[in-house]
């Protein structure tokens, strides 16, 4: 039975609590903002009033029995899941909870290598072992695609006893694997299917979009409501199917999730769920139309390539998210990160990310046509002002890894710093990545090759934001002794 999606239990409880004018002798110490006037002036009194502690009238995220429990029931109903958990540590915490639920130390996890760092961080923490299915690569765009079904089948056949398959739905660029077939394969082999849907919230509510993970048969899905769903940064849902023990999942979530959940984030999830449940179809029809219009206008400029469903090949690109405005830039002689920097510095336009060959302009519920027009105009100007011959430019975003140690073993091994240029042949002991998108160039336990070194040096030269290393200047990498 569908529940009444007009309800917002957490928001309603906060409003009722505020009307009672309770005298606070609990945390937070700002006491409804009175103790920090500057912060209150900056954020607003309503915000400070809602920044309260867990208590009986407001429930407790670690063990919800009233308003949060009802809000989670509404979320599960809206997404078509058996259970939904409010996550206030971002989708990172939801992704890690999925891995923790599926695997223990020594278990094998089948996954593409182009995953977010949160997945590999989870393997570092729990000690499971990655079995990578190297994604295909689009040679023109230089981007990694999805996992081929045959590649996943081979990995399953070669790794009997593997506990789960992990899939991006979609990738940062909008690429979708054949998640339905992969889900069926997982079920046939008594494995869980875990879906990273950090960029796929809208799949659950829009029309003519790729299939959502839970609908496709995923057992668990991590959903970033704060990306395409309109909630506050750091707020997400963890969705579970019928085959997942919800009580066990809650216990695992509570291992790492805060005991002091922000009611700003919780109420934001509650309100945003209502908005998508009631208006999502219209919202994402509008978002798709904006992105399609932008693609058409950008492709008219010349040399840029804003790609879409023409990439679909039925396997490693089973579908494409048409709301993703991913743009290939190398044909104007500029790396994606260079266009990204020009947009921000010269045109006051903040794109989501720029990498070696592409930019991503994130189009969502909050965008308007005038913003799209400004972006198109800026890209036109950048081509006119800065276009140059395409020479000596790398394009490949993905380098197939060679795993020599588990991420956990490498991360906790004795390590030493070595100049980047001298690390060839060593086993990496830390992460090296451009952020965003946060997909490691090399991760703990992987062999550092000459291609990897050249990529790191090139990315630094072009201005990519390099993270994950002990040395903030990335002159040295920690390698296993």
Image: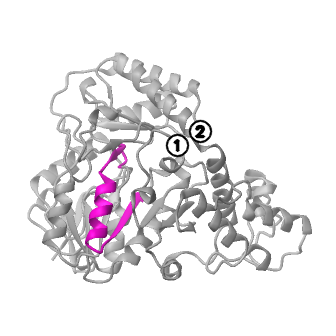
Looking at the picture, tell me which residue is in the foreground, 229 or 456.
229
45 with respect to 237 (left or right) = right
Residue 471 is at least partly visible in this image? no
The residue that appears at 31% across and 25% down in the rendered structure is 304
Give, as a single range, the part of the protein colored magenta: 171-196
Question: Residue 25: x, y in percent?
Answer: 83, 80
User: Is disc 1 surrounded by few (<14), some (14 to 19) or many (20+) residues within 10 Å?
Assistant: many
Q: Which residue is mark 1?
A: 206
| Image height of 413 relative to 283, above or below | below
The answer to whether marks 2 and 1 mark residues whose Cβ atoms lie closer than 8 Å is yes
Q: Is residue 320 magenta?
A: no
Question: Residue 465: x, y in percent?
Answer: 36, 49
The residue that appears at 24% across and 53% down in the rendered structure is 147
The residue that appears at 64% across and 59% down in the rendered structure is 2
Q: Which residue is mark 2?
A: 283
**Mark 2: secondary structure:** helix
Q: How is the image coloured?
A: one colour
Looking at the picture, tell me which residue is in the foreground, 42 or 197.
197
Of labels 2 and 1, earlier in sequence is 1
Q: Please state, as top left, top right, bottom left or bottom right, where the C terminus lies in the image.
A: bottom left
| Image height of 404 relative to 237, above or below | below
- Of circles 2 and 1, the one toward us is 1
108 with respect to 385 (left or right) = left
């Amino acid at each position: 039975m569908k529940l009444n999606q007009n309800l917002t239990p957490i928001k309603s409880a906060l409003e009722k609590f505020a009307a009672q004018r309770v005298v606070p002798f609990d945390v937070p110490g700002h006491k409804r903002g009175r103790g920090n006037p500057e912060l209150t002036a900056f954020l607003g009194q309503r915000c400070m009033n809602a920044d309260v502690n867990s208590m009986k009238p407001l429930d407790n995220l670690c063990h919800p029995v009233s308003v949060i429990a009802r809000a989670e029931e509404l979320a599960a109903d809206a997404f078509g899941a058996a259970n939904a958990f409010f996550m206030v540590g971002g989708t990172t915490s939801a992704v890690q909870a999925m891995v923790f639920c599926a695997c223990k130390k020594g278990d094998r996890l089948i996954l593409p290598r182009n995953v977010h760092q949160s997945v590999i961080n989870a393997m570092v923490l729990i000690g499971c072992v990655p079995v990578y299915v190297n994604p295909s690569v689009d040679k023109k765009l230089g981007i990694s695609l999805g996992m081929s079904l045959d590649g996943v089948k081979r990995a399953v056949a070669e790794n009997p006893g593997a506990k789960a398959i992990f899939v991006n739905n979609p990738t940062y660029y909008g690429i979708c694997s054949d998640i339905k077939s992969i889900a069926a394969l997982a079920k046939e082999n008594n494995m869980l299917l875990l879906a990273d849907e950090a960029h796929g919230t809208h799949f659950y509510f829009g029309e003519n979009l790729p299939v959502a993970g839970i609908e496709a048969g995923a057992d668990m899905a991590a959903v970033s409501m704060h990306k395409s769903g309109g909630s506050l940064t750091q707020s997400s849902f963890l969705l579970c199917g019928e085959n997942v023990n919800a009580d066990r999942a809650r216990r695992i979530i509570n291992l790492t999730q805060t005991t002091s959940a922000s009611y700003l984030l919780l109420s934001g999830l509650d309100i945003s769920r209502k908005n998508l449940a009631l208006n999502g179809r219209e919202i994402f029809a509008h978002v798709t139309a904006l992105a399609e219009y932008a693609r058409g206008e950008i492709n008219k400029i010349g040399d840029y390539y804003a790609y879409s469903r023409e990439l679909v090949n039925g396997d490693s690109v089973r579908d494409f998210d048409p709301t993703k405005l991913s743009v290939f830039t190398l044909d104007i002689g500029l790396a994606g990160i260079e266009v990204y920097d020009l947009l921000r510095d010269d045109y006051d336009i903040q794109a989501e990310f720029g990498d070696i060959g592409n930019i991503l302009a994130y189009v969502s519920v909050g965008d308007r046509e005038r913003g799209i027009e400004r972006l198109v105009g800026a890209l036109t100007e950048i081509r006119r002002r800065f276009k140059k011959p395409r020479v000596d430019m790398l394009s490949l975003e993905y380098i197939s890894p060679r795993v020599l140690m588990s991420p956990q073993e490498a991360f906790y091994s004795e390590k030493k710093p070595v100049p980047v240029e001298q690390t060839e042949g060593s086993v990496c002991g830390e992460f090296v990545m451009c952020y965003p998108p946060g997909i490691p160039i090399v991760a703990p336990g992987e062999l550092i090759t000459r291609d990897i070194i050249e990529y790191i040096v090139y990315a630094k030269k072009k201005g990519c934001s390099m993270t994950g290393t002990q040395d903030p200047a990335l002159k040295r990498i920690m390698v296993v002794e």
